[in-house]
Image (tube, rainbow, N blue to C red):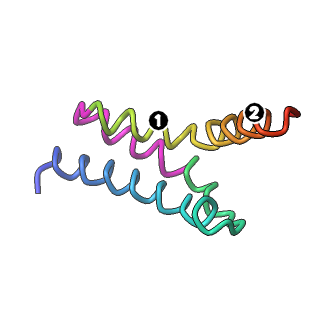
């Protein structure tokens, strides 16, 4: 396995792992603390994707790194639209 393929595989696995740890919180509505691992795993994916210069994987891992603030913003925005209160 070449270094390029190895780093690309690490970036893909880190993105899929970050998505997988959000599934219990969003789909099943159960509070799981595993989403905190996105702050550890996503930078590893960003670094490995930047080593092979694969920009889609860089962007997807950056989105997963900032997924908590994005979900909080979306939740508060939806609550404001529906109820009129933040």
Considering only vertical position in the picture, is 47 above or below 29? above
Q: Which residues are magenta?
A: 40-54
Residue 18 is left or right of residue 59, and the answer is right
Percent position of residue 63, x then y: 48, 37
Where is residue 69, by image quadrant?
top right
The residue lying at 31 percent from left, 33 percent from top is: 50
Categorize mark 1 by other alpha carbons within 10 Å: few (<14), some (14-19), many (20+): some
Residue farthest to the right? 85
Categorize mark 2 by other alpha carbons within 10 Å: few (<14), some (14-19), many (20+): few
Indicate whether residue 67 is drawn in magenta: no
Residue 58 is left or right of residue 3, and the answer is right
Instruction: Between residue 15 and residue 31, name the one nearer to us.
Output: 31
Dominant secondary structure of the magenta stretch? helix
Residue 13 is left or right of residue 41, and the answer is left
Query: Could you tell me which quadrant the N terminus lies in?
Result: bottom left
Q: Which residue is mark 2?
A: 81
């Amino acid at each position: 396995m070449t270094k390029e393929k190895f780093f690309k595989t690490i970036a893909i696995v880190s993105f899929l792992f970050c998505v997988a740890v959000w599934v219990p919180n969003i789909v099943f509505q159960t509070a799981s603390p595993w989403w905190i691992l996105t702050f550890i795993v996503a930078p590893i994916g960003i670094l490995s994707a930047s080593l092979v210069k694969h920009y889609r994987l860089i962007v997807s891992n950056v989105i997963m790194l900032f997924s908590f603030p994005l979900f909080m913003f979306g939740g508060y925005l939806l609550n404001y639209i529906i109820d009129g209160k933040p």
